[in-house]
Amino acid sequence: MQFYHLPKAEGIDDLTLAEAPEPEPQRGQVKLRMRAWSLNYRDLMVATGRYGVGGTKPGLIPLSDGAGEVVAVGPDVRRARPGDRICPTFMQGWLGGEVIAEARQRALGGGIDGVLADYVLVDQEDLVHIPDHLSFEEAATLPCAAVTAWNALFGARALRPGETVLVLGSGGVSVFALQFAHAAGARVIATSSSDAKLARLRALGAADGINYRDTPDWQEAVRALTGGRGADYVVEVGGAGTLPRSIAAARIGGQVALIGVLTGGQIDPAPIMRRNIVLRGIFVGSREMFAAMNRAITHHRIRPQIDKVFAFAQAREAYRHLQAAGHVGKVVIRAA
């Protein structure tokens, strides 16, 4: 089989195609023939050795997100059978409840090898079935970005119809949060640097759009759009550089889901305290969340937004397209 790995993790050009014998499933394992993969900003950090405390392990197989077909199972497998369409979970071993340290160390494409290979082995407990109406390419977008957005909106106090959600930008997490919030009956306000992107976000269900290049104090625009109250939920993907504006855009007692690390800076805790803001750090989610999300996707016939699809041989080009940050939704790689 063919697979990609990062011998030195010194950048996108370090992504190297190699060959190895096909793996065979052991007890409790499922063998997947991978059909599609998707990229996250995290994968750029992994490729450049900037992910995690110790950096990227030399030789790591990258990517957490993929979808495939079961081609073989080991003894005692009861949760899947050949022919099933499957996604591995982002964090192997986090089945439900609170995350444990051991599961955090088993995040695909980070702590352990990922899925950018023709075939991968997955423990039967660390997989979910793909909604019937989704293609492999669409399903490959779900494990990280979609589950992260679901956790942000429904992982603690669940979003209620009629509430307001602020999403930042047009990346995978933000677009999924928009789609889930719209399906739940919430009002969505979206920000972007581009009027063209805002038009696409409105087409997906955003009630209002704010161009943050034209309106740098976008938190004030959010408060104006909500009659001075602020958003009930903010899906914060920028990091410390945008967090103060996100806190100011939230209502008193509102929730800010802290997800991204795109910008640097310092965080002042005083506004969080004074405004009784609930600040939740989000690191994807459990298999239980993934399954609940898939039920909602199936019920509402939600289709992930794919910006562009690349061939397996074009993996480096897919990384560069993500790095250019012109996408709306997800960047996907398709198997040959």
Image (tube, rainbow, N blue to C red):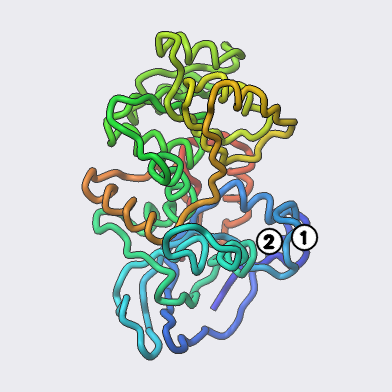
Tell me the kind of residue under disc 1: Gly
Q: Is residue 221 left or right of residue 6?
A: left
Quarter of the figure with residue 217: top right
Tell me the kind of residue under disc 2: Leu
> Callout 1: helix, strand or loop?
loop
Considering only vertical position in the picture, is 243 above or below 141? above
Which residue is found at the position 32% from the left and 64% from the top? 129
Tag 1 residue: 54
In this view of the protein, which residue sits in the foreground, 209 or 151? 151
User: Residue 335, position in %: x, y?
Assistant: 46, 64
Tag 2 residue: 15
Q: Is residue 334 visible?
A: no
Crowd rating for badge 2 (residues with CA inside 10 Å; few <14, some 14–19, many 20+)? many
In this view of the protein, which residue sits in the foreground, 110 or 35? 110
Q: Which mark is residue 13?
A: none
- State which tag comes first along the sequence, 2 or 1: 2
Q: Is residue 237 visible?
A: yes
User: Residue 269, position in %: x, y?
Assistant: 67, 29
Q: Quadrant of the N terminus?
A: bottom right
Which residue is found at the position 48% from the left and 13% from the top? 223
Q: Is residue 245 left or right of residue 127?
A: right
Considering only vertical position in the picture, is 308 above or below 115? above
